[in-house]
Image (spheres, grey):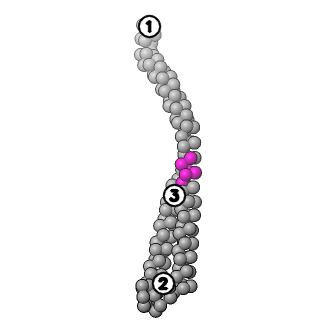
Amino acid sequence: MAESTQNPFSEFMKIMEVQKKELEKISGQLLESQAKAQEMSKPVLEYQQRLFEESIELQKVLMENIMETVRKMLKVMTDNPMKYTGGAGVGAGLPADQFSDYVRSMQKVQEKWMEQFKTTTSMFQDIISKK
């Protein structure tokens, strides 16, 4: 009792010291668990990044295949227009103006595919760069 009469804050300081030690222990455990969580999530994030990169590559290859197929089809149609126009608009083929419209619409489809590919690719790259 003599100590408490000399220093009225001694009990308060003891409590604060105990709380400080408890907080240090808890914060140490939190930091340790956070480090473990980062360690465990790192392979998952790396795998996800690889998937995004592979997805971009697959989209690129798919787009190239589509473009090549369209190019070949248009080449075949332009090399032998009589077969596809029905001989100047006569027969079961497409009339010449419809053939031209078809070629223009295919070019528009190609452009839209390329736009979508660029948009998707940039989206994936943004996601990857943020990680």
Percent across and percent down for residue 38 are 54, 39
Residue in front for this viewpoint, 16 or 35: 35
Residue occupying image coordinates x 55% and y 80%: 76
Badge 2 or badge 3: first in the primary sequence: 2
Q: In the picture provided, is 3 more to the left or to the right than 41?
A: left
Amino acid, disc 2: Tyr
User: Residue 41 occupies which quadrant of the picture?
Assistant: top right
The residue at which mark 1 appears reads as 2
- Tell me the magenta residue range: 47-53
Percent across and percent down for residue 128 are 54, 54
Residue occupying image coordinates x 49% and y 62%: 120
The residue at which mark 3 appears reads as 124
Badge 2 or badge 1: first in the primary sequence: 1
Nearer mark to the viewer, of 2 and 3: 2
Question: For the N terminus, which image quadrant?
Answer: top left
Residue occupying image coordinates x 52% and y 32%: 33
Crowding at dot 3, Cα within 10 Å, few <14 / some 14-19 / many 20+, comes out as: some
CB atoms at circles 2 and 3 under 8 Å apart?
Answer: no
Residue 51: say if magenta. Answer: yes
